[in-house]
Image (cartoon, rainbow, N blue to C red):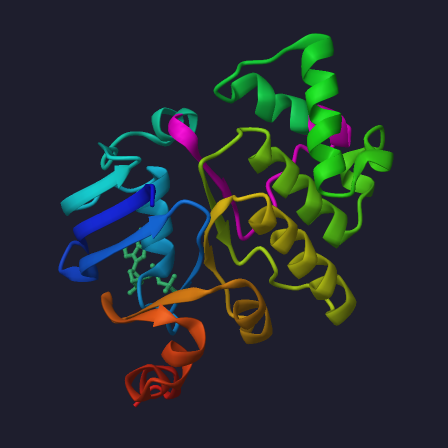
């Protein structure tokens, strides 16, 4: 089994606050793993360290065996890590296709021109947005903006996709569409680490979950077992 990501003894301190404390876990190729925990437990900080926005205070983050901790985001992205953000970061005055093309221009393949246009269309097809390719990004509905953000992440042809509450704010119908879309990526063998609060989505998508509380890992295992774990239940109830 190929290991895509391995965190070993990762600690992140902000001044006197230990946001992430001696965290270790790994992801094998093709796994879809949920990173769970109550607010403030350190999930976003972990995503920020994997993508290079924060350097860990201590510990090793390996991508396909290569240490990447402390590298800048623009160094980590071309090594195969793509991320969507909680707030959709589009370039609203550009078309949908152009938004994906900018991701291609700055991605590891550095594609421009006709090649980028064709590639962008391919990634828009992957997320079911090809027919909107020529529209302005600002005219898209919320779910379609989310699709576009995913197409931009896929444009990097990542080995690891980080989804940070990508499903947040969707209505029930959109949520179903969003879950189907992530499942289609899973079926194509994408390795995904996702931070998500929607429990139905976690159950549908994640074979395994890692649960954090106050910066520490408190559970790591099959989703149904983890969600029944008394320590996890207590952490969520906040006692
Ligand atoms: P979660 O994503 O699980 O809600 P976070 O990773 O956002 O948790 O936060 C974990 C802890 O780290 C919190 O106490 C938060 O206030 C703190 N924290 C996060 N980012 C910073 C930062 N840039 N500076 C200082 N403290 C931070």
| 211 versus 131 height, above or below | below
Q: How many marks?
A: 0
Q: Position of residue 227 (x, y in %)?
A: 41, 80
Residue under the point 49% across and 54% down: 164
Question: Residue at 44% across / 78% down in the picture?
Answer: 224
Confirm whether the magenta stretch covers residue 168: no
Residue at screen point 69% across, 45% down: 147
Q: Is residue 53 left or right of residue 154?
A: left
Which of the pair 70/120 is nearer the observer?
120
The image shows residue 200, relative to residue 34, as above or below, that is: below
The magenta span reads 79-99
| Residue 89 shown in magenta | yes
Task: Please state the quadrant of the image where ligand 1 appears.
Answer: bottom left
Q: Residue furthest top?
A: 113
Picture coordinates of residue 171, whole percent (x, y): 74, 68
On screen, residue 19 versus residue 34, left or right, reads left
Residue 220 in the image: state x and y as whole percent.
30, 68
Residue 77 visible, this orientation: yes
């Amino acid at each position: 089994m190929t290991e895509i990501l391995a965190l070993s003894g990762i600690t992140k301190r902000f001044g006197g606050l230990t946001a992430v404390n001696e965290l270790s876990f790994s992801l094998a190729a093709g796994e879809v793993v949920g990173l769970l925990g109550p607010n403030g437990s350190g999930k976003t900080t972990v995503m920020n360290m994997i993508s290079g926005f924060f350097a860990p205070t201590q510990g090793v983050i390996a991508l396909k065996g290569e240490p990447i901790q402390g590298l800048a985001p623009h160094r980590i992205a071309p090594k195969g890590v793509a991320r969507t953000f909680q707030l959709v970061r589009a370039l609203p005055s550009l078309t949908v296709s152009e938004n994906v093309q900018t991701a291609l221009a700055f991605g590891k393949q550095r594609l421009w021109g006709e090649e980028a246009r064709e590639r962008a269309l391919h990634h828009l097809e992957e997320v079911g947005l090809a027919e909107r390719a020529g529209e302005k990004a600002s005219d898209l509905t919320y779910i379609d903006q989310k699709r576009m953000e995913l197409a931009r992440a896929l444009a990097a042809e990542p080995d690891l996709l980080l989804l940070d509450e990508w499903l947040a704010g969707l209505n029930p119908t959109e949520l179903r569409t969003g879950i189907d879309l992530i499942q289609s990526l899973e079926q194509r063998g994408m390795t995904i680490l996702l931070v998500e609060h929607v429990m139905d989505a976690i159950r549908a998508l994640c074979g395994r979950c890692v649960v954090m509380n106050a910066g520490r890992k408190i559970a790591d295992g099959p989703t149904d077992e983890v969600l029944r774990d008394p320590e996890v239940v207590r952490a969520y109830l906040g006692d």
